[in-house]
Amino acid sequence: MRKINGRKKTDERAYASGGRALGIRFASHAQAKNEADYDALVAGLDELLSLIGENEDSPLMSLVDILSDWIETYDHEHRPMPVASGVDVLRYMMREHNLTQSDLPGVGAQSVVSEILSGKRQLNVRQIRWLAERFGVSVETFI
């Protein structure tokens, strides 16, 4: 281990060699450069997780964290999440929960919900709070 910014940091190369010793195949570099590298990282993570199961105290959990970080980095760079507006999220939630415009009294009358969905009106703070509580999500979901 080495210290970075006052915290202990495990040497990734040591874990990479440990993973190979266990028969786990994954890219030998921190960044997946293509889909094949990415697939190898995912396969290695899957195999590692099947080995350690639910044991979160396993010394191999550090390797799980490293592989997860590498996979997440590739995902962020090559598969960015689309940005959804509050109205897009509301439409999605209504569809998923089989709701009609009349099923959202905390937003307003059916005509108000219709205006929001059509873009003629924006969600206000009160409506956002009500929707967040109604669907059990953060208020940021609708902002």
Image (cartoon, rainbow, N blue to C red):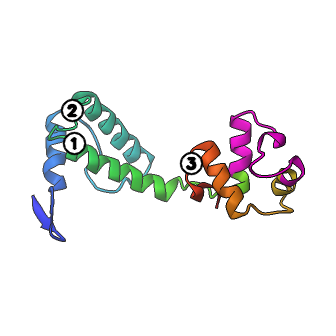
Kindly identify which residue carries mark 3.
137
The 10 Å Cα crowd at callout 1, few under 14, some 14 to 19, many 20 or more, is some
Kindly identify which residue carries mark 2.
55
Give the residue type that dot 1 points to.
Met
Closer to the camera in the image, 143 or 61: 143
Give the residue type that dot 3 points to.
Val
Report, in whole angstroms, how far the alpha carbon at label 1 lies from the one at label 3: 29 Å
Where residue 17 appears, as percent x and y from the top left, is 15, 45
Residues at badges 1 and 2 in contact (C-beta under 8 Å)? yes
Report, in whole angstroms, how far the alpha carbon at label 2 lies from the one at label 3: 30 Å
Q: Which mark is residue 49?
A: none
* Nearer the camera: disc 1 or disc 3: 3
Q: Over which residues does the magenta segment extend?
A: 89-112
Q: Is 113 covered by the magenta stretch?
A: no
Q: Secondary structure at mark 1?
A: helix
Closer to the camera in the image, 112 or 26: 112
